[in-house]
Image (cartoon, rainbow, N blue to C red):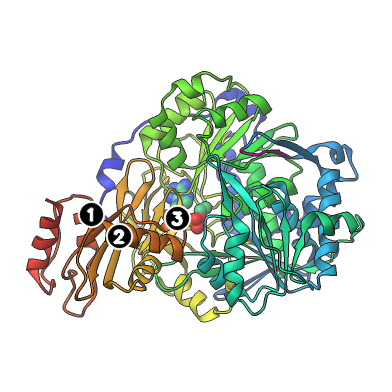
Amino acid sequence: MADITSVLKEKRVFKPHKEFSRNAHVKSLTEYKKIYQASLKNPEAFWAGKAKELHWFKPWKKPLVWEFPNAKWFVGGKINASYNCLDRHLSSWRRNKAALIWEGENGEERVLTYQDLHREVCRFANVLKALGTMKGDRVCLYMPLVPELAVAMLACARIGAAHSVIFGGFSSQAIRDRINDARCKIVVTADGGYRRGAVINLKNNVDEALKETPTVKQVVVLQRTKEVIHMQLGRDHWWHALMSEASAVNEAEPLDSEHPLYILYTSGSTGKPKGVLHTTGGYLTQTAFTTRWVFDLKEEDVYWCTADIGWVTGHSYVVYGPLANGASVVMYEGAPNWPDPSRFWRIIEKYRVNIFYTAPTAIRAFIKWGEDWPRKHNLESLRLLGTVGEPINPEAWMWYHRVIGGKRCPIVDTWWQTETGAILISALPGATPLKPGSATLPLPGIDAAVVNKEGKEVPANSGGYLVIRRPWPAMLRTIYGDPARYKKQYWSEIPGVYFAGDGARRDEDGYFWVMGRIDDVIKVSGHRLGTSEIESALVSHETVAEAAVVGRPDEITGEAIAAFVTLENGHVPSEDLKDLLRSHVTKEIGSIARPAEIRFTDTLPKTRSGKIMRRLLRDIASGRETLGDTTTLEDFSVLARLRKEEE
Ligand code: WTA
C-alpha cells in the first residue's frame, strides 16, 4: 500500500454553495448522515422505497433474498426496463421531451423525443422477434455511438433478451470470443462509424468473427457511413429495410425482477474476459436512484455523459439511469478533439448542457491542449461536473473546477465498477464538502469499508482493501456461465465481503481515497485491461517465448502498457519486431490494448516458485528505483540487465 503520503497532503475542502444546496435533492451533510444511518439500519426498507418509484407490473414479495454470495432483489416482482425508460413517460407531457440529443462526429444532428424513441424501440423489438429472438436469448451489439445502439438495447430489454454490447474498438477475435461465450443468436452492427475523421469499418470485423461463431444465425446492419460492405444472403439484413416493415406496436414483456438484462465483458486479473451479468429490477432501481441523487438531476436539465456505450458507464449513465428518470440525454459519437480540441465545449454551448460527466483521462488531455479551447465557449449552462473511471489527481480536479466549472460547479467523483452496476461512493453535490481527489462518502444503502486481509477495518489514513459488506441491488449476479469463478473472484479473497481489486484509505472524516487497482488490472484511459490477456496475445505470436505486462504511469492515459518480452531462440530483437508485436496485440484484442512500450529481455525476474515479479517490472517500467524485498528473486542479474536495456 505505497503512495499514500503524497495524497495525504491534500487539505483543500470545497463546501457546497448555499444556492445549490437549497435546490438539491439532499441539502446538507447532516441530512445525508441521517439518511445514510437509517439506510444501514434497514437497507431492505431503504431500497424498497427506491424501487417503488419505478413501474412494476406486479409488486415484489421480498425486497431481498441473500444466500451468500447470491442475491435476489425484489423477488416475485414483475418489471420491464424498457417500459420504465419509455412507456412510463408517454402518459405525461414528457412524451414530447427530448430523450436523446445526438450529434455525429461528422456534424449530423438528431433529436428523438420519448415518443420517437418509444416508436423506434417498439419497431426494433418486433424486428428482433421476427428474426426469431426469444425471451432469454442473448443479442450481440457491436455498433458506433448512435441512437440506434440505445434503441437496440431497449428493444432487447423490451422482449427479455439480454444484450451483450461490445465496444467498437475491439477486434474480430475479441468479438468472436465474446459471442461464443454468451452463445449469441443475433448480431446487430453497422457498416461503420466515425472516429477522428476516419471511418472504422465494423462490419468487416463482424464478418471475420462470424467465421467461427456457430450460434449466430442473423445479422442486422445499420447503414451509417455507406461503406461498401459484404452482405451475406440469408444471414445479413439491412436495419432500414426491416424497420420500414415493422409495426410500431409492441407490448413490453412483464419480466421477473431477476431476469437478465445484459452481459458486459470486462477484464480481470486472470484468464479471459468475464461476462458480468446484470439483472433487471435491482439494477434499474439503483441506476435510476443514483442518477437522480448524484447528478442532482432536475426535469429541465440537459445531461451529458461522454462515455461510450460499450462500457458500463454508458449502460448505466447514458441509457438506463437517465432514461428511467425521463432525462434529456446528449450523445456524441466521436473524439473530443475532432476537428479540433474545442469539440466538447462547442457541444456544451450549443445544447446548453447542465450536467457533464467525463473521465480523468479526458480532463488531463484537455489540460494538455490548453485553456484557450474551453475559454472560447460559453460554458455558463453547466451546473454540475462529474468524473469516473480512475482516481483523479487533485491538480486535474482543480483545473476542471476552475476552467470548466467556473468555480461554481460541484464535482462528483464517482467510484464504482462494471460489477457494481451503479455508483457506490460519491459526493451528493448539495450535501457533501468536496476534497479534490477523493470520491468522498458511500451513498445511502452502501456499506463500504477499508479493511485488512482478515476483513478487519483499518484505522483512519491507513491503506487497505476497499470492500462492500452487504449486497446492493445493482450488483452483478454472476459471471456468465461460471458461478464458481464469481464466488472465487469477488467473495473469497476477504472473508464474507465483496472485494474487486481496489486499494484505498479513509481519512479522519471517513472520506474514501481510492488508490487504484492492486491486482493485475491496468487502466488505460479509464479502460480496464487484464495484464494476462495482453500477455496471452503476445505469447500467441510465433516469435515470443514469454511475456510480462505491467502498467506504468502516463500523464494523459493514467497508465500505459509496458511489455517485457522474451523471444524464442533464433529471433533477434529489433524495432520492426516491436511494431509487429504491437500490431499483433491490436489484431488479437483491439487498439486499446496496444503496448506503449516493448522491451526485449533474455529472462524475466521470477520468484523461486516461478512467479513473475511484476512489482519489480513496474518499478523498471516507470523508471523508479527498486525498493522493497528482492530476496526471493531467482536471478539477481536479471534486474541489472533489464535496467541496462533502458540505456
Ligand atoms: C477505477 C468503471 C478512483 C477503480 C465505472 C475500479 C475509480 C475500476 C473511480 C472499475 C473513481 C472507477 N476513483 N478509481 N472515481 N471509478 N475507478 O469496471 O479501480 O471500467 O475498480 O468501471 O475503475 O472500472 P470499470
CB of mark 2 near ligand 1 (< 8 Å): no
Q: Which one is in front, 362 or 538?
A: 538
Q: How many marks?
A: 3
The answer to whether 365 is drawn above or below residue 76 in the figure is above
Label 3: which residue?
591
Sort mark 2 into few (<14), some (14-19) or many (20+) by Cα contacts within 10 Å: many
Which is more toward the observer, 89 or 143?
A: 143
Q: How far is disc 1 from disc 3 in space, using C-alphas?
A: 21 Å
Q: Is residue 208 left or right of residue 188?
A: left
Q: Nearer the viewer, mark 1 or mark 3?
A: 3
Calculate the distance from the C-alpha at mark 2 to the C-alpha at mark 1: 8 Å
Q: Say above or below: 197 vs 211.
A: above
Q: Is mark 1 within 8 Å of ligand 1?
A: no
Q: Is residue 74 visible?
A: no
Q: Going from the N terminus, do you reach mark 2 or mark 1 first?
A: 2
Horizontal and vertical percent position of residue 219: 72, 66
Helix, strand or loop at mark 1: helix
Q: Residue at x 46, y 30 (%)?
A: 400
Q: CA distance from mark 2 to mark 3?
A: 17 Å
**Element under label 2?**
strand
